[in-house]
Amino acid sequence: MPERPRQPLELSRADLQALVESLGQPRYRGDQILAWLHGRDVLDPADMTDLPRTLRETLAAAWSPTPDSTVAEVAVSTDGTTRIDLSLHDAACTQTVLIPETPDDVEDEDDTPPPASAALPALPPLPVLPTPSPQPPIPWTRSTFTQCLSTQVGCAFGCAFCRSGSVGFVRHLSAGEILVQRHWARRTLAERGDIARTVVMGIGEPLHNLEALLAALRLLADPRAGGVSPRRITVSTIGLPEGIRRLGEEFEGRIGLAWSLHAADEETRRRLLPAASRRPVAEVVAALRAYPLPPRRRITVECVLVGGVNDSVHHARDVVRLLSGLRCKANLIPFNPWLGAKTDLAAPAVAAVEAYRETLAAAGISVFVRKPRGADVLAACGQLLGTSDGGRFPPPRDVGG
Ligand code: SF4
């Protein structure tokens, strides 16, 4: 198969500067293009009105004016959580989720949020979607959202509670395919809201697709491009030490880090995270301790609690011991069941979650129980797949995790 040409959204600042120079233009034209692509979601060079006409015409001849992905479906939950299914250039699918922010999210912040950014510039009208599906009216007014990004189609790690891992690994997303999720999300929101936070917690293990992830984050966090403060971005990982080290080095610890721990003892981890448990938990903790966190920031430790598997006070005490001395806070996520999940997996009892929470809190760990969001449209944590019906996937590949 011929190699797919790089898409405008995945060109780095240096790439764009080299491109405009090769066309006889000054380097700052590259920054102007960056701002159009990532700051204003304008992909059509003909609409980049501060570029000289000749440059616009040259770029327009080489670039498609629209992304090479399409929105296949938009599903809105009764709580306002919005799942956007994307059909990619090879017809593989991935998903991104917009979660309306609540006061709880602000309580969960490490420190005071920065002032709200200026209003987004008006966006061009939405193109006609290929397979529009009827949707209920969106029940919210202008608001702020957290966007959850995916980094892969399928996932190699096969965590027992996770729908994304149930299909195996299909392929990595390119940096452009990660960033285009933001493009489509902002167009879907249009005047209804802004994206205030970005979490890389969707389909796939982000640090397994490290180079594309870093390239996407560089563009997202570049003030001349996406302009998103790194402190408003969190990458979630099951714990790949080399990726944690690279992420820490590249962004000097300013990108938030969330560790999907789920259980501290190796036996329960093997049951819940068969691939992740190949890395001893002590090795991951060492990588987390070396992460160059700025003052007042903490690593988020996530535990999906599965009834009767890892939700006892005994498990909570093991977690307390493991986290001793680590600058962290904990997020407890009651398991979100989905059709096709292993039958021995169940949501935890409310009392078990509370006892678990109290054990961590009594040990001085700041702990937060995440409410399920978007479960009615399969958009909650651990429920993403690629399509709402489990639709089209090329055959999975075994990459060994
Ligand atoms: S929880 Fe994350 S790493 Fe595990 S299978 Fe799901 S997407 Fe992959």
Image (cartoon, rainbow, N blue to C red):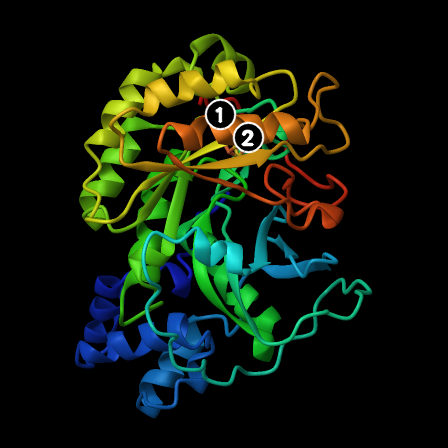
Identify which residue is drawn at 22% across, 46% down: 253
Residue 243, x across and y down, in percent: 30, 34
Residue at point 49%, 25% (across, down): 262
Please identify the residue farthest to the front as the structure is shown: 362
Whether residue 338 appears in this view of the structure is yes
Closer to the chain start, of discs 2 and 1, is 1
The quadrant in which the C terminus is found is top left
Q: Relative to 325, is 56 on the left or the right?
A: right
Q: Which mark is residue 71?
A: none
| Residue in front for this viewpoint, 96 or 268 | 268
Residue 375 in the figure: left or right of residue 105: right
Instruction: Return the mark for residue 304.
Output: 2
> Quarter of the image holding residue 292?
top left
Quarter of the view holding residue 34? bottom left
Badge 2: residue crowd in 10 Å (few <14, some 14–19, many ≥20): many
SS at mark 2 in the image: strand
Q: Is mark 2 within 8 Å of ligand 1?
A: yes
Measuring from the top left, give residue 191's x and y in whole percent.
Answer: 58, 80
Q: Write the residue at 48% across / 66% down.
A: 195
Residue beneath disc 1: 262
Residue 400 appears in the picture as rendered:
no
Q: Amino acid at mark 1?
A: His
Which x, y percent locates residue 380? 63, 44
- Residue type pointed to by label 2: Val
Q: Nearer the viewer, residue 358 or 202?
A: 358
Cβ atoms at labels 2 and 1 below 8 Å apart = yes
Q: Secondary structure at mark 1?
A: loop
Q: Is residue 282 above or below residue 180?
A: above
Q: CA distance from mark 2 to mark 1?
A: 5 Å
Residue found 48% across the figure and 54% down from its top: 177
